[in-house]
Amino acid sequence: MLQPFISQTLNGTIWRLQIDGETGIMAIEIRNETDKQTSFASLNILTGQTYFTALTLPERWLTGIEAIYKGIMLLHYYKHESGPEHKSIIAINAITSAELWSNYSLAFDHLSINGPVVYNTNIQPKKLFVVDVLTGQTLRPYDAGTDKPLENDIVIPEMTPVNQMVPGILPDEPYGNMVHYLNHNSYRIVSLHTLKNGALQQHLYIINNNDVVYHDLLNQDIQKLQPEAFVLHKNALIYIKNKAEIKVLKL
C-alpha cells in the first residue's frame, strides 16, 4: 500500500499552490477567514522537507502568491479589497523565508523561461520587462520570441464520464455522471463523489492492477460537488484534504 510522503496540516484554507520545477519547492497560500490572516508555507516535494508554514506580511489579508522561481517566492498585494487587481512584488527566499527585495511600483504579469515578466503600474500603456528574480533589477524589455512562458509540468486530471470508465474499475458508486481521472505509470488515479446518508463525500483512490493501493476521504458532509482533488507534478501526486491538509505521494 502507498503512504503519503508529505502530510502537513496548515492554519487555514489552502488557497493556492505554486511549484518550482527546478528546485521541487512548493509554495502554498493559506487564508484564515476567521482571523482575516493570509500566510504562506514552503515545502520540498522532492525531499519532504518543510521550510516554514506560517510566514506573514505586514498586510494581513490583501496579499497572495504570484509564482515561485529558482527558489524565490514572489508575493503580491491587492489594490483593493473588492477587486482582483494586484500591486507590488515581494521576493522571499523559499527556504529561509527572508525577504530578498520588494518593489511597490511593479506588478507581476507572468513567468518566462528567463525570469519574471513585470510592468510598472504607474506607466500606461503597460510595458513589460524582465527582472532578475534574485535582485529585482531590470534585465531588459520583454520579448515574446525570446521570453517564452515557463512550463510548470503540472498535470490536471480529466473529467471523465462514468459510462466511459472500464466496468468494475471504480471502487465505489459515484454520485453524478463524472469523475476526475488520470493515468500515471502503472497507476490509475480517481477522485469521485459519493452520497452517504444524504450527504456528499469526496474520495481519492489510487488503483494498480485493479487493486486499490491507496484511499483517502478528502471531504465529507459537503453541499456541492468539489473541483479536481489532485494534481500531478512529474512523479509527485499532490492533493488537499479537508481544505487545510496538504499531502504528497510518490508514484
Image (spheres, helix red, strand yellow):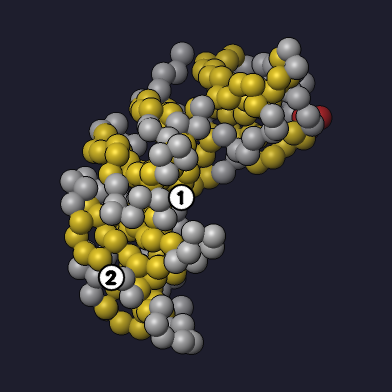
Number of marks in the rendered image? 2
Residue 171 vs residue 10, the one in the foreground: 10
Q: Residues within 10 Å of mark 1 (few under 14, many from 20)?
A: few
Residue at image point 28% right, 70% down: 103
Secondary structure of the residue carrying numbered label 2: strand
Q: Which mark is residue 14?
A: none
Secondary structure of the residue carrying numbered label 1: loop
Q: Residues within 10 Å of mark 2 (few under 14, many from 20)?
A: some
Residue 85 vs residue 41, the one in the foreground: 85
Residue at image point 65% right, 26% down: 222
Amino acid type, residue under disc 2 in the picture: Asn
Amino acid type, residue under disc 1 in the picture: Asp
Residue at image point 46% right, 78% down: 144
- Could you say where residue 178 lies in the image, as x and y percent from the top left? 74, 33
Judge from the rendering whether residue 169 lies leftward or rightward of residue 112; answer left or right.
Answer: right
Disc 2 from disc 1: Cα separation = 29 Å
- Could you say where residue 91 lies in the image, as x and y percent from the top left? 27, 60
- Could you say where residue 227 lies in the image, as x and y percent from the top left? 63, 39
- Could you say where residue 181 lies in the image, as x and y percent from the top left? 64, 34
Q: For residue 145, what is the image quadrant? A: bottom left
Q: For residue 29, what is the image quadrant? A: top left
Q: Name the residue tied to disc 1.
A: 153
Q: Which mark is residue 103?
A: 2
